[in-house]
Amino acid sequence: MTSSDLRERHRRALGAHTPLFYEQPVHLVRGEGVWLFDADGTRYLDAYNNVPCVGHANSRVASAMADQASTLNVHSRYLHGGVIDYAERLASLHDDSLTTTVFTCTGTEAIEVAMMTARAATGRRGIISTEATYHGNSTEVRKLSDIGRRLAAGAAPDPTIGAVPVPDLASGDLDTHLDFLGEAIEAMAASEQGFAGVLMCSLLANEGLPEIPNGYFAAATDLVHQAGGVMIADEVQAGFARSGTWWGYDRSGFVPDIAVMGKPMGAGLPLAAAMSSEELVGAFRRSTRYFNTFAASPLQAAVGMAVIDEIEDRGLLAQVNDVGGYLLEGVRAITDRPAQMGGIRGVGLFVGIDWLDEHGQPDAKGAVAIANQMKLRGVLMGRSGALDNCLKMRPPLVFEREHADVVLEAFGDVMSSVA
Ligand SMILES: Cc1ncc(COP(=O)(O)O)c(C=O)c1O
């Protein structure tokens, strides 16, 4: 079967507009650590995927999954020690004020739980996020994810959603961005909806990892609390050691009322959660009859526990700081630097590089072309950002310096070919 046959079958079986990365999509058949292998045996270095955080086909995770699946897996309406152990272990990694967990299967669901919790606790509905964000794809969460597009199209946002410009030092200092937030909170509080809370990724990952004004999140949390709202940190990308601290909120210097986790949490098994205080979870539980068939299962707990064990036993926090710093410095040190290479930012094992056109304007298409060039050189990376022009390197946490060297060599080559 040729790859064009497979693409045609993919189109028919999964639908015409189902997204695939790269001009020539990769047909993967196997993964191992930081490596992915296609059907022809070509090896790719994975510099993109955060879900397999402890490496592709991790044996500890696979064994935990197999052992638990062959022992017991049931829904959450039974007592199970493994689930409680896992919830307690997770809480022990968070700030002391975050104690109690609502498990879900996807980040979208956990974001929705967080929004429902803020609304239940405050009795109000208005949630504020940034105007260039992505938090998930359900009808409710999509209102946040779509707000940028709606504003750009001149359409009125949903009245329950407010948005502020991305708190990026490049577009304003701390006071400017706090003013934006203060005004948005005031407007929401004065509206029929009332103000329930603010929801932001603690690293602003989908916003393109901008340089957040120092102290922004701590001061923003104060503003939220003064207005009687709930501060929600989306840790779906930022959490689980990605930032070189356990949580993005540690790195950004604040303590949220709710932390939403997902993606790397189950290393590929659908596992996500919203964690907050007993009081907030109590408000949520009282106001909903929330039940999620596959969530808070013994299988999720066993796998989630194996992921934490791997991160701790392999010293991945320290590794993320070391390798992330090395990768960032390496990108900054590229000598044959084309004019299209704009700002370079990094946090933990996460690097973002703005890609610009010949007039210095954001160039989303150019960023795609660079990702394609990298793929041809055997390195998988992606892009994100408010304007989709931010090249993104966000490899599994088990990435080592020798892997960073492979990325840097390929990236240096591609940059020379552009310069
Ligand atoms: C920051 C952030 N929050 C939430 C989500 C939604 O997670 P999921 O795709 O598991 O529903 C995503 C997914 O990309 C995300 O990047």
Image (spheres, rainbow, N blue to C red):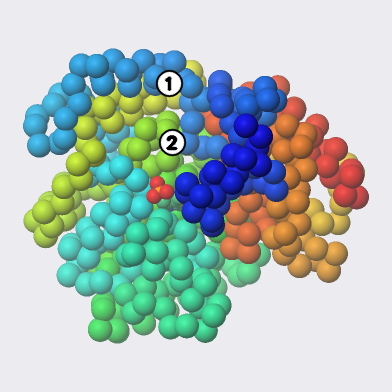
* Residue 199 rendering spot, x and y as whole percentages: 38, 60
Q: Disc 1 versus disc 2: distance between alpha carbons?
A: 12 Å
Q: Is 172 situated left or right of 297 in this image?
A: right
Image point (21%, 32%), residue name: 297
- The number of numbered badges drawn on the structure is 2
Compared to residue 206, the image places residue 358 above or below, namely: below
Image point (47%, 47%), residue name: 13
Q: Is 384 situated left or right of 262 in this image?
A: right
- Residue type, label 1: Glu
Q: Earlier in the sequence, mark 1 or mark 2?
A: 2
Dot 1 alpha-carbon crowd within 10 angstroms: few under 14, some 14 to 19, many 20 or more = some
Please tell me which residue lies in front, 175 or 49: 49
Q: Which residue is mark 2?
A: 264
Compared to residue 209, the image places residue 88 above or below, namely: above
* Residue 49 rendering spot, x and y as whole percentages: 55, 37
Image point (89%, 43%), residue name: 416
- Quadrant of the image occupied by residue 401: top right
Q: Is residue 362 visible?
A: yes
Disc on res. 339? none
Q: Which residue is mark 1?
A: 310
Tell me the element at label 1: helix
- Residue type, label 2: Pro
Foreground tag (1 vs 2): 2
- Quadrant of the image occupied by residue 272: top left
Please tell me which residue lies in front, 346 or 137: 137
Q: Is 260 situated left or right of 1 in this image?
A: left
Q: Is 237 situated left or right of 76 in this image?
A: right
Please tell me which residue lies in front, 159 or 370: 370
Image quadrant where one finds the N terminus:
top right
* Residue 95 rendering spot, x and y as whole percentages: 32, 41
* Residue 142 rendering spot, x and y as whole percentages: 39, 64
